[in-house]
Image: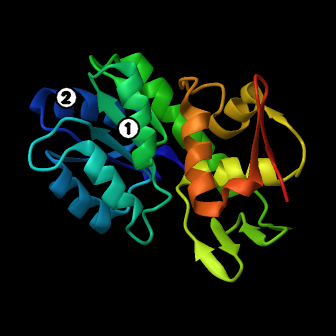
Amino acid sequence: MKKNEIKILLVDDEPDILEIVGYNLSSEGYQVSTAKNGIEGIAKAKKEHPHLIILDVMMPEMDGIEACEQIRNIPGLNNVIITFLTARGEDYSQVAGFDAGADDYITKPVKPKVLISKVNALLRRLKDSEEEVASINKVGDIEINRDEYKIVQKGNEIILPRKEFELLSLLASRPGKVFKREEILDKVWGNEVIVGGRTIDVHIRKLREKIGDNHFKTVKGVGYKFVL
């Protein structure tokens, strides 16, 4: 997919941010649209189906956290890449953002080079996933359809955000194997994207809630493994 075919939705209540960030992304060749709050952002996301959404956390009417949660529940948008813009403390940003279903976050004040680097890295993973050969992996009572980004467990379809799906797919690719934290970060998030140490823990907790606690084992000080 060419850059001029990729759609990015920027949602922020600060006109300067919309202008500066929008200009830098447009200069890279991306299609950029903007919204000034979460409600308007959700409406535009439904209409335009962007490949990437950049959401400010603190906004009037509806903040980025709530907007992200609602977007993740919209058919056709549950796997869109979402990254937050935030001026809040790092720990809060990561936990609250990842709990809501975000893939990454960018700290304000926004540095153009960092912004472009992160956006390019996130979209590169989108490209890689599109080029991946279609396959279905059946592991115990779980069927993982990599082509359709769909999970079926005991006949029930489970929709997961992109990063949760990729994490489950990685762990389930070799049941019993202990995947080190460094390997998980590299294969799921990519070494171009900087995320905090709690990122994996938050996503594993979400998977335990949705798939079953018995399928995930923590190997203290090492990483995680999938158990049949």
* Amino acid type, callout 2: Ile
Mark 2, secondary structure of its residue: helix
Residue 7: where, in percent of width, then height? Answer: 39, 51
Closest to the observer: 81 or 141? 141
Mark pair 1, 2: CA separation: 22 Å
Residue at mark 2: 17
Give the tally of numbered discs: 2
Residue 116: where, in percent of width, then height? Answer: 43, 27
Quadrant in which the C terminus appears: bottom right
Q: Tell me the residue at 65%/62% (across/down).
A: 211
Discs 1, 2 touching: Cβ within 8 Å: no
Closest to the observer: 170 or 2? 170
Which disc is residue 132 wearing? Answer: none
Q: In this view, does 94 lie to the left or right of 69?
A: right
Q: In which quarter of the image is residue 133?
A: bottom right
Q: Tell me the residue at 39%/20% (across/down).
A: 90
Residue at mark 1: 96
> Which of labels 1 and 2 is toward the front?
1
Q: Quadrant of residue 189?
A: top right
Closest to the observer: 28 or 148? 148
* Location of residue 31 with respect to 40 vertically, above or below: above
* Amino acid type, callout 1: Ala
* Location of residue 111 with respect to 45 vertically, above or below: above
Q: Can residue 1 be seen in this view?
A: no
Q: Tell me the residue at 26%/35% (across/down).
A: 22
User: Does label 1 or label 2 sit earlier along the sequence?
Assistant: 2
How many residues crowd around disc 1 within 10 Å: few (fewer than 14), some, or many (20 or more)? Answer: some
Q: Tell me the residue at 37%/68% (across/down).
A: 74
Mark 1, secondary structure of its residue: helix
* Location of residue 114 with respect to 68 vertically, above or below: above
Residue 98: where, in percent of width, then height? Answer: 45, 40
